[in-house]
Image: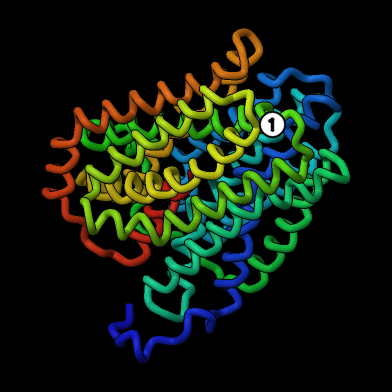
Amino acid sequence: MSSHSSASSPSILHQPRAVWAVAFACVIAFMGIGLVDPILKEIAAQLEATPSQVSLLFTSYMAVMGISMLITGVVSSRIGPKRTLLAGLALIIVSAALAGFSDSVGAVIGFRAGWGLGNALFVATALATIVSASAGPVGQAIILFEAALGLGIASGPLIGGLLGQVSWRGPFFGVSVLMTIALVATAFFLPTTPPTGRRTSVLDPFRALRHRALLLLALVAIFYNLGFFTLMAAGPFALPTYSIMGIGWTFFGWGLLLAFTSVWLAPVLQRRFGTMPTLTAVLALFSADLAVMALGAEHEVVVTLGIVVAGAFLGVTNTLVTEAVMGAAPVERPVASAAYSFVRFTGGAVGPYVALKLAENVDLHAPFWFGAAAVAVGVVVVAAGSRTISAALAGNAPEHHGVTEAESELVGDLA
């Protein structure tokens, strides 16, 4: 990597077409996180499904994505990053289109699972590809990626709302079309990238979890993801008078705050207060936010403000936990990311289903109490394991290996 000063570095906007092609694909890929939020109620109505059934749109997507993280390194190290990217994009295109054509909620759930597999293959390789193809230093490439991530997370609910006003099928077809453009651009502009480095094993992430600090962080991630996915699934059903577009705007505000705090606020708080104290405080605030939503679940203003404010807490949490994971275990960063993401997504994926089952069988307040309690358990785990994690971070000061570091930072940024 070049050692030129920042003054002589090229502008972040002066990038090869390959970088812009992958960055565009990143925006569309990250839209998938919140794309279905505005249309959950419409899908339930049109396909005669219960809230807990449509919650499986999140569960299938995140569970399969988490499990697939175990094999992304195996695939990329054997067929190369470009082929891995294209395979992921192709799976998303086909899965999203088939979901749009489906006439039953079970079929949509199944195709969302295929979407999760495609997303895992794509995002686990995207940042490393941007870094390797970038014209500037690694820092610029990461900023460009973070911008794509933030734009995708924030715009997903908005695009979902706009297309969902036409039909609940619209967001699925929209993603399929946009991803087709991204696939063509990636295939045309990105040079062939042969496999590099050692071939990883599917067992490597499980071996990494033997390190106590990494295991503690993965457990923390399960509990805060239970709260996060509860918010995503239960939020729309707690806004009964909101239109599709109204829900879209609400989660657009959530996404904007998440993007802003993950990129700009989290580093400031980390420098000022330290990683573990900041993480403990922010998780406690997120739990309190969910508790306030539980108390005021029948008031749409309370739920709306709670959803938007939660974006700030989740943005900071994502960044801090990701950085901690990268330094918590003396293993390769991609392996640490795979281990953490596997536990995080597969464990947290049950949140939407449990939350909306509680809404069906108890009341509207119950899902948010469930989320608040889950995140509170995460706070206890952080507090109990703070010394172990801090010692691991101090003892495993991460080296800076350019592409490898960038690749591993990616997965934890997926809230």
Res 180 quadrant in image: bottom right
Q: Is residue 162 above or below residue 356?
A: below
Place of residue 291 in the rendered image (x, y in percent of width and height, measured from the top left): 46, 26
Residue located 65% across and 55% down the image: 155
Question: Is residue 60 among what the camera can see?
Answer: no
Place of residue 74 in the rendered image (x, y in percent of width and height, measured from the top left): 44, 45
- In the image shown, does 323 or 93 lie closer to the viewer? 323
Place of residue 163 in the rendered image (x, y in percent of width and height, measured from the top left): 81, 49
| SS at mark 1 in the image | loop
Q: Is residue 415 above or below residue 380?
A: below
Give the side of residue 328 with respect to residue 303, left or right: left
- In the image shown, does 316 or 404 lie closer to the viewer? 316
Give the side of residue 21 with respect to residue 105, left or right: left
Give the side of residue 9 with respect to residue 360, left or right: left
Question: Is residue 404 among what the camera can see?
Answer: yes
Q: Is residue 126 above or below residue 114?
A: below
Res 387 quadrant in image: top left
Dot 1 crowding, Cα within 10 Å, few <14, some 14–19, many 20+ = some
Residue located 60% across and 9% down the image: 362
- In the image shown, does 250 or 399 lie closer to the viewer? 250
Give the side of residue 185 with respect to residue 337, left or right: right
Quadrant housing the N terminus: bottom left
Give the amino acid type for the residue marked by disc 1 in the picture: Leu
Q: How are the colours assigned in the image?
A: rainbow
Residue located 50% across and 45% down the image: 311
Place of residue 130 in the rendered image (x, y in percent of width and height, measured from the top left): 49, 67
Residue at the extreme top: 361
Residue located 62% across and 69% down the image: 21
Residue on which the image places disc 1: 239
| Number of residue marks | 1
